[in-house]
Image (cartoon, rainbow, N blue to C red):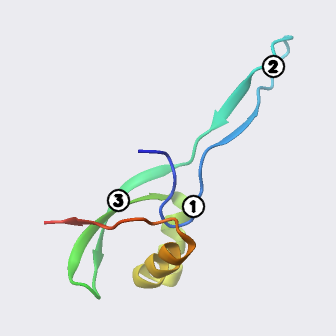
Amino acid sequence: MSKICEITGKKAMVGNNVSHSNKKTKRRFNVNLFSKKFYWVERDYWITLKVSAAGLRVINKNGLDASIKKAMQAGYLKEIRVIS
């Protein structure tokens, strides 16, 4: 699985190393991702999402149902994994 937030669409960025040598190398800035279980009240089941810390704040602000609908419209969320 790639390291992409399923709610906000955030993904890893590439930047320069800050060092005092003459090496020109790049580094990756990864996203702060969590694999988190949520209870979706409208559908009455548990789901798992890979969300970033910013995605958790978006879910807390807008609610799970609205955040999932917006992420599906934007194309960030392809499938919903239901926990049996």
Q: Nearer the viewer, mark 2 or mark 1?
A: 1
What's the residue type where badge 3 is placed? Lys
On residue 68, the disc is none
Give the CA separation, mark 3 to mark 2: 36 Å
Q: Quadrant of residue 40?
A: bottom left
Q: Earlier in the sequence, mark 3 or mark 2?
A: 2
Give the CA separation, mark 2 to mark 1: 30 Å
Classify mark 2: helix, strand or loop: loop
Callout 1 touching callout 3 (CB < 8 Å): no
Using residue 17 as the reference point, say whether residue 60 is left or right of it: left
Q: Nearer the viewer, mark 1 or mark 3?
A: 1
Q: Position of residue 35 (x, y in %)?
A: 36, 54
Q: Earlier in the sequence, mark 2 or mark 1?
A: 1
Using residue 30 as the reference point, say whether residue 13 is left or right of it: right
Q: Residues within 10 Å of mark 3 (few under 14, many from 20)?
A: few
Classify mark 1: helix, strand or loop: loop
Image quarter (top left, top right, bottom left or bottom right) of the N terminus: top left
Callout 3 touching callout 2 (CB < 8 Å): no
On residue 19, the disc is 2
Vertical order, 15 against 7 (above or below) = above
Give the CA separation, mark 1 to mark 3: 16 Å
Q: Earlier in the sequence, mark 1 or mark 3?
A: 1
- Residue position marked by numbered label 1 in the rendering: 9
What's the residue type where badge 1 is placed? Gly
Classify mark 3: helix, strand or loop: strand
On residue 36, the disc is 3
